[in-house]
Image: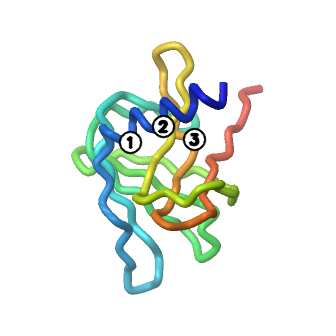
Amino acid sequence: MKHKLLVLAAFFGLFLSISPRAAMAQGNDILKARIPFAFRVGNVNFPSGRYTLKPMDETDRWMEIRSDKTGRGAFFQVVATDVRKAPSKNELIFHRTGNRYSLATLLDQGSHVGDKVIRFRRG
């Protein structure tokens, strides 16, 4: 399973076009990404396209994702997670279930700490 996840992450790393994070005046980071497939964040479905991800508070535990084309977005919560090997570039990792993809983890270039998306179960 771990091998499949690593292969999946490497595969999508080739297709994701993620620019380096740029610091905003308030110290918040922005991540730009081109995601070439439909995906889900929480209970919100998104089509392929260009997206902006950014923290919503000073703790960086709440994030926002927004379509650059339509402006449609969603808020989601993340928790810090340790990364064995610091990535050489920013990465988004998705979980695949059948033909559906869900945003799972955000990794910062050169950092051993990533942001894992908290998945809430439906009642």
Which element carries disc 1, helix, strand or loop?
helix
**Front: mark 3 or 1:** 1
Within-10-Å neighbours for mark 1: few <14, some 14–19, many 20+: some
Structural distance between the alpha carbons of marks 2 and 3:
10 Å
Total tally of numbered discs in the picture: 3
Within-10-Å neighbours for mark 2: few <14, some 14–19, many 20+: some
> Which numbered dot is residue 9?
2
Which amino acid, mark 2? Ala
Is the residue under label 2 in contact with that under label 1 (CB below 8 Å)? yes
Q: Is residue 108 left or right of residue 117?
A: left
Structural distance between the alpha carbons of marks 1 and 2:
6 Å
Q: Residue at x 35, y 56 (%)?
A: 52
Give the quarter of the figure containing the C terminus. top right
User: For the view shown, which residue lies furthest in the top direction?
Assistant: 98
Structural distance between the alpha carbons of marks 3 and 1:
14 Å
Q: Is residue 44 above or below residue 22?
A: above
Which amino acid, mark 3? Ala
Which element carries disc 2, helix, strand or loop?
helix
Q: Is residue 116 left or right of residue 28?
A: right
Nearest to the observer: residue 70 or residue 1: 1
Which comes before the other along the chain, label 3 or label 1? 1
> According to the image, label 3 marks what residue?
104
